[in-house]
Amino acid sequence: MTSLFKQLATVAALVTLCAAAHAQVDKPVRILVGFPPGGSADQAARLVGERMATELKQPVLVENKPGAGGRIAPELLKNAPPDGSTLLVTPVVVPVLAPLVFSKLQYNPQTDFAPVAPIANFQFGLSVNAKHPAKTIPEVLRWMQANPAQANFGSPAPGSLPHFFGVMLSKGAGVDLVHVPFNGGAPLMNALLGDQVSTGIDTLVDQIEMHRGGKTRILATSGATRSPLLPDVPTFTESGLKGVEGTGWLGMYAPAKVPAATLKQLNAALNNALAAPELRERFARMGLEVTGGTAEDLSAHMKRDTDRWAPVVKASGFKAD
């Protein structure tokens, strides 16, 4: 009898192994993006999707589902079949910031998503009008202290990471900065050019053309190290503001309960795509610093940034609903 049980256990184990080995993506794949075409998340999804199609030997299509601050796409991911045929490429706002600012969400990133891998990081910067007298962060802070009625910063949206980075800056610098939200990066930069705000905080890619054109001046960048886009511009830490640091990122997710073998296949396909020199060059031009890595790396990013931004969001008093 014992021998029979052993034989049955062996057969069961073999069946399980065979099932896992065949839990691979075997149908066309769609990558959901919760933002309009043309943005960094959309472009990144299309670039990695094109190369992942070759790795997976399946067509890969990007579907834009804009609206609700990026929250429509993750709701669709949550309800998608857990077979690896539906993925999500999203910035940090969806898995980290949204749970901090919305009391009611239709998804839980901890239980409804399966991390595939991080894709890339991106930095923020603080800009002033090129006519502004300040040329460094210490200078602009002294100017704000001397002109408290103009001590403000603009961001592309309320509840965005640039908004909360401004809150972090305000606290770290010990200067009471008023937040002025806009509806997008372009209106923010126009307001900066028109002296409607004293400073602007946004992603580097949304500020760099004005900076290079001599219309604005980026005084500092938000990463732990200088941005490859602007190697001559110091970080906030280098500018004397220790702890004023934070970056955005893009990550890829699958629905929860996707088989481990499928996740492994998707992770390998994504990392191979990110290793291509042509893709890395395209990302660099977009202001994206390629990361790649494991599913565990993406989970660690989520925990680290939840711990980083939760006290900042609380200090801001901002709630989206």
Image: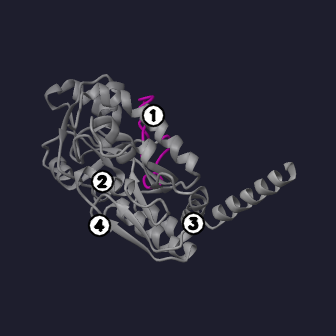
The colour mode here is: one colour
| Marks 4 and 2 in Cβ contact (< 8 Å) | no
Above-or-below relation of 223 to 117: above
Q: Going from the N terminus, do you reach mark 3 or mark 2 first? A: 2
Give the number of the disc on residue 37: 4
| Marks 3 and 2 in Cβ contact (< 8 Å) | no
Tag 1: amino acid = Thr
Give the number of the disc on residue 302: none
Measured Cα–Cα span from mark 3 to mark 1: 36 Å
Q: Going from the N terminus, do you reach mark 3 or mark 4 first? A: 4
In this view of the protein, which residue sits in the foreground, 131 or 294? 294
Q: Which of the two discs, 1 and 4, sits closer to the camera?
A: 4
- The location of residue 233, given as percent across then percent down, is 42, 46
| Marks 1 and 4 in Cβ contact (< 8 Å) | no
Disc 3 residue crowd, few under 14, some 14–19, many 20+, Cα 10 Å: some
Tag 3: amino acid = Ala
Tag 2: amino acid = Gln
Q: Residue drawn 44% across and 57% down?
A: 288
Above-or-below relation of 317 to 60: above
Q: Which of the two discs, 4 and 2, sits closer to the camera?
A: 4
* Residue 311 visible from this viewpoint: yes
Above-or-below relation of 205 to 106: below
Q: Which residues are magenta?
A: 224-246
Q: Which of the two discs, 3 and 4, sits closer to the camera?
A: 3
Q: Which of the two discs, 3 and 1, sits closer to the camera?
A: 3
Q: Which residue was labeled with disc 1?
A: 237
Measured Cα–Cα span from mark 3 to mark 4: 23 Å
- The location of residue 205, given as percent across then percent down, is 35, 56
Measured Cα–Cα span from mark 3 to mark 2: 32 Å
Location of residue 61 by image quarter: bottom left
Q: Going from the N terminus, do you reach mark 2 or mark 1 first? A: 2
Secondary structure under tag 4 reads loop
